[in-house]
Amino acid sequence: MKNKFLKQIVNAIAILIVLTFILGVIYPFIVMGLGQLFFPHQANGSLIRQDGKIIGSSLVQQKFTSDRYFHGRPAIVNYTDTPTNKELLQRIKDRIKTDRKQDMHKNQYVPVDLITDSGSGVDPDITPAGAFYQAKRVAYENNIQIKDINTLINGHIKGRILGIFGQKTVNVLKLNIALNTYLKTHKTNGIW
């Protein structure tokens, strides 16, 4: 009986070691290798480079505060926020006032993604409505025509997944890179 029990323990330890090696070493290296082989850009974090320098990732929100650029979603994450939380409601009201003033709108509807927090705090995209809402400010601050800003926005709208899932979005970093490229090619003051 003692020998049988000892044999079971040795077998269990051997299985643990083998499975740990297979699932903890071999499998991750295979998945990493396949990712590098078939999806190298995504496997390395979807990094965006400009002039040989990494300036961000298309998967993670970058904070833009200059009025010359498009802004992403607010990223203050507070898991105690609920629709009835008075602090949340006041923050949203304050953001509406700020956005209307900043983006030069009086009583126009403020797109919800510009005034509500991103659940993850790192959402890199806004809705097309959020981008178009900011167009007037961006055009004014950069001294360019709003039609040119709208053209940039239209060129950066990503469609729904498979045409039916999710909503249309605009990646803020990519849009701001395109804006900066426009500013440089039109001899205005591109900041980057």
Image (cartoon, helix red, strand yellow):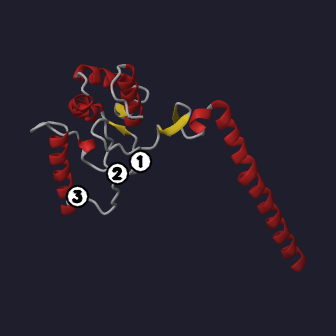
Write down the quadrant of residue 159 in the picture.
top left
Cα–Cα span, label 2 and label 3: 13 Å
Image coordinates for residue 187, horizontal then vertical, percent:
35, 21
Q: Are marks 2 and 1 in contact (CB under 8 Å)?
A: yes
Dividing the image into 4 quarters, which one contains the C terminus?
top left
Q: Which residue is mark 1?
A: 122
Disc 1 marks a residue whose amino acid type is: Val
Badge number at residue 88: 3
Asked whether the viewer can see residue 149, the reply is: yes
Do tag 2 and tag 3 residues touch (Cβ < 8 Å)?
A: no
Compared to 54, does 85 lie above or below? below
Horizontal side, residue 100 vs residue 155: left or right: left
Of pointers 2 and 3, the one earlier in the residue sequence: 2
In the image, 177 versus 80, the foreground residue is 177
69 above or below 83? Answer: above
- Quarter of the view holding residue 166: top left
Numbered mark located on residue 137 in the image: none
The quadrant of the picture occupied by the N terminus is bottom right
| Amino acid at dot 2 | Ala
Residue pictured at 42% horizontal, 30% vertical? 161
The reply to whether residue 158 is visible in this rendering is no
Q: Residues within 10 Å of mark 3 (few under 14, many from 20)?
A: some
Label 2 to label 1: alpha-carbon separation: 7 Å
Q: Which mark is residue 75?
A: 2
> Residue furthest toward the bottom?
2
